[in-house]
Image (cartoon, grey):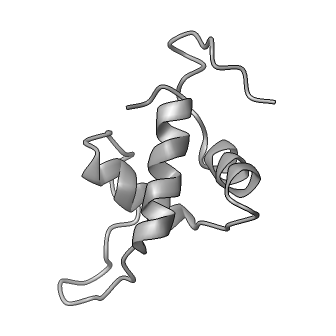
Amino acid sequence: MYEMDLTASESKATYEKIKKYVAEYNDGMKVSNLYIAQVKRKCGIELAENFNIPRSEGAKQPQCPKEKEEAIIGALKAFQMI
């Protein structure tokens, strides 16, 4: 379903495309925008300014579980973002 011969502009997958890819190839697994942003940040992919940054210094955010991180990384690789 996903064409892997992407041009540079097409390789910038949206969060919705990443969510759909993860669900399709990982038995319906759901991932949040927060988890995608955390993985993208971890991989050194630039995010929009202030995207999913804690609102206060001590604010705690849930961390992406390992299996979801691996699924997101697989999607980022499929979309040639990493």
Q: Position of residue 64 (x, y in %)?
A: 41, 72
Q: What residue is shown at x 36% (from left), y 77% (from top)?
A: 63
How far from the left and from the top, in percent, is residue 78?
55, 32
Residue at 67%, 58% (x, y): give it: 26
Q: Where, by quadrant of the figure, is residue 69 drawn?
A: bottom left
Residue 13 higher or lower than 55, as above or below: above
The single residue placed furthest to the left in the displayed view is 57
- Marks counted in the figure total 0
Q: Is residue 9 above or below residue 73?
A: above
Outermost residue, right side: 1
Name which quarter of the figure residue 59 lies in: bottom left
For the residue pair 78 and 55, the one nearer the viewer reads as 78
Please provide percent x and percent y for residue 52: 40, 65
In the image, taking residue 72 as reference, residue 26 lies left or right, namely right
- For the point 44% across and 56% down, which residue is it? 70
Q: Position of residue 56 (x, y in %)?
A: 25, 84
Query: Left of 78 or right of it: where is 1?
Result: right
Viewer-side residue, 45 vs 23: 23
State the residue in front, 38 or 59: 38
Q: Is residue 3 left or right of residue 54?
A: right
The quadrant in which the C terminus is found is top left
Residue at coordinates 32% horizontally, 68% vertically from top-left? 53
Q: Quadrant of the N terminus?
A: top right
Q: In this orientation, which residue lies closer to the viewer: 62 or 74? A: 74
